[in-house]
């Protein structure tokens, strides 16, 4: 049994008979996961943001904070959400701000060139999964280092949180 085939500790391993074609399957099948390409960890970043702080900044700047921080695609989503619900618009802004902070930490630049607020956007795949999209010189910087970034974001009433992992693909022996 390989690591990918190892059942969770609370589930027994399937017998060979139950894996046979035509054998009955449980009501909750274990998903099949294809092995990922091997990567090495480059960096990890996290950020937690108290939403009330952003409320204060938005009041002081007359809303310009969103224009300064969000990328063009994020800004479209922000305005759409803001028009439907001020609370959800604010939560969106806060999760994206936290994501930018987490990404800047994961890649080790902080908020220094080529990392800028608008150079990295956290958009959603059709499935809803958040996806990091870099542009301009930051995209070139990431590509030159063969870095990819995974992001997780969440918000609650008082806080927005983001967790980013930057990794580098390990070249296989066939591509060297």
Image (spheres, rainbow, N blue to C red):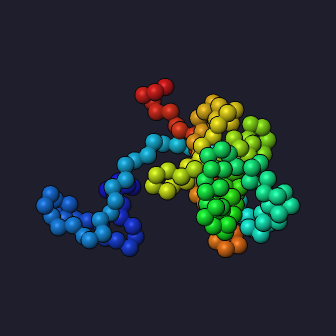
Residue extending farthest left: 22
Q: Which corner quadrant holds the N terminus? A: bottom left
Left or right for 170, reference 18: right
The relative height of residue 39 versus residue 20 in the rendered view (above or below) is above
Location of residue 54 with respect to 172 vertically, above or below? below
Residue 43 at x, y = what percent? Answer: 65, 48
Which is more toward the observer, 152 or 79? 79
Residue 140 or residue 18, whichever sits in front: 140
Asked if residue 133 is positioned above or below residue 28 in the image, the reply reads above
Q: Position of residue 155 (x, y in %)?
A: 63, 67
User: Looking at the image, which residue sits at the far top?
Assistant: 176
Q: Position of residue 56 (x, y in %)?
A: 82, 65
Q: Is residue 80 above or below residue 52?
A: above
Q: Residue 164 at x, y = what percent?
A: 63, 53
Say which residue appears at 70% left-offset and 61% top-offset: 94
Residue 126 in the figure: left or right of residue 59: left
């Amino acid at each position: 049994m390989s690591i990918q085939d190892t059942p969770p500790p609370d589930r027994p391993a399937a017998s060979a008979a139950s894996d046979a074609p035509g054998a009955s399957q449980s009501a909750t099948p274990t998903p099949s996961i294809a092995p990922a390409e091997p990567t090495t960890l480059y960096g990890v970043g996290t950020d937690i943001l108290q939403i009330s702080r952003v409320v204060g900044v938005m009041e002081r700047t007359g809303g310009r904070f969103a224009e300064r921080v969000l990328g063009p695609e994020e800004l479209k989503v922000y305005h759409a959400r803001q028009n439907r619900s001020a609370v959800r618009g604010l939560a969106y802004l806060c999760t994206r701000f936290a994501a930018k902070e987490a990404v800047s930490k994961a890649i080790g630049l902080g908020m220094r060139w080529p990392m800028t607020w608008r150079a990295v956007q956290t958009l959603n795949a059709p499935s809803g999964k958040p996806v990091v999209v870099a542009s301009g010189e930051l995209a070139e910087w990431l590509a030159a280092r063969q870095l990819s970034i995974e992001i997780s974001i969440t918000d609650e009433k008082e806080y927005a949180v983001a967790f980013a992992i930057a990794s580098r693909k390990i070249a296989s022996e066939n591509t060297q």
